[in-house]
Amino acid sequence: MQKLMGIVLCLALASPVYGAAPDSVEVWVGEMRADRFGASFLFGSEIYVPASEISLALGAECVVFNEYTGNMEVYADSLRVSAKVGERYITANGRLVYCPSGVIFRCNRVMMPASSIAKAFGAGLRYDDEARKLTISAAGEPIQPADWTEDDLYWLSRIVNAEARGESFEGKIAVANVVLNRVKSDEFPDSVKKVVFDTRFGVQFTPISDGSVYLTPSEESCLAARLALDGADVAGDSLYFASEEASKCCWAERNRTRFRKVDHQVFYL
C-alpha cells in the first residue's frame, strides 16, 4: 500500500495554466470551483475535466495514478472507478461508461468527459453556454452494474461483428443499439438471441442466412457489444438500419424516420 500511495498523482501541485484558452470551460461542483487551474475544455460536444480534481470534489476518498501505465483508480464510498489514458471508456463499479473521444492526458492531468464522471457518481450536469460554465451537482446514488447475461454478450458481439465488420467503433455500437432497442420494444422478441434469430417477417439480419453470425467476433466487436449493454448509445431509439446503398430502396427508407447516418449505415426510428 505504501508503494501504491507513492504514485498518487498530486495534481494540485501542477503548474497553473495562465490565461483562458479559447476552448476553456469553468467547472463547478455545487458552489465550489473544482478545476482550480482552468484545465477543463470543450472538445466537440463533450466537456473534458481533470478526473482527479472533480472526483475529489464529488467526495472521492483517494485518487491513484500510475504514470508508467496510464492507469487511474478512484476510490469513493460505494464506488470504484478505473480509467486508462487512451481507452474509450472508464469502468465504474464494474460497468463500462463510454467516452467517445477517449481518456486523454493534457496539462499534466488525466482528463475525461464530465458526463462520464457524473454518471459514475450519480451527479447531474448543467451547462451555461454563454458563460462557458459547467455546474456538476452533488453526487447521488453511484452507478450500478447493468442487467445483462453472458448469453446476451455472446450473441450481441457476434451479430455486431457480422453486420459491422467494416464499420468504425461507433458504427459497431450503433448496430448493437438497434438490437437492444428491439429487445425493449413490444414489436420484437424479448431477448438478444431471439431478436438476432427473429424470422417472423423473414430473416431480419443477413448474417443469419449466410452463417457469418457464427464467426468468432473481433475484440473491438466484443467491446462495442459490452459498451452497448452497459448503456453506450449512439443510435438513439433506432429499430432499423441499412447500408447506404440499400437505403435507397429499402422498406425502412419508405416507412420509417431517418435518425442518423454512421459510416456506411443509415439508422431509422
Image (cartoon, grey):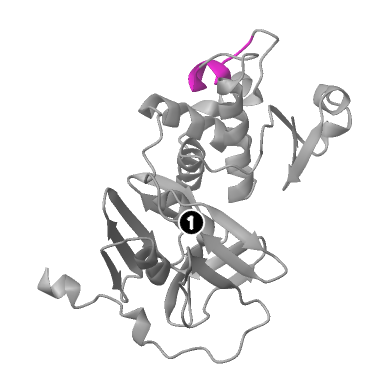
Where's the C terminus, which quadrant?
top right
For the point 31% across and 80% down, which residue is it?
A: 10
Residue that badge 1 annotates: 137
| Magenta residues, start to end | 191-199
Side (left or right) of 123 relative to 239: left
The crowd level at tag 1 (other Cα within 10 Å; few <14, some 14-19, many 20+) is some
Question: Which sits in the foreground, 49 or 7?
Answer: 49
Task: Please tell me how many numbered marks the rendered image carries.
Answer: 1
Where residue 60 sits in the image (x, y, percent)? Answer: 31, 61
Residue 208 in the figure: left or right of residue 14: right
Mark 1 residue element: loop
Mark 1 belongs to which amino acid? Ser
| Image position, residue 103 (x, y; %) | 47, 64
Instruction: Name which residue lies at 41% across and 29% down.
Output: 148
Query: In the picture, residue 144 is in which quadrant?
Result: top left
Nearer to us in this view, 47 or 141: 141
Q: Residue furthest top?
A: 200
Q: Quadrant of the N terminus?
A: bottom left
- Residue under the image location 43 percent in, 82 percent down: 108
Residue 188 image point, x, y percent? 61, 15
Look at the image and say whether residue 51 sits in the magenta stretch.
Answer: no
Query: Which residue reaches farthest front?
Result: 31
Residue 166, quarter of the rendered image: top right
Residue under the image location 38 percent in, 66 percent down: 57
Residue 196 among magenta residues? yes
Foreground: 21 or 66? 21
> Image check: 180 left or right of 240?
left
Residue 230 in the image, given as x and y percentages of width and height = 46, 39
Q: Relative to 183, does residue 140 appear above or below in the rendering? A: below
Q: Can residue 43 be seen at all in this image of the molecule?
A: yes
Is residue 165 visible in the rendered image? The answer is no
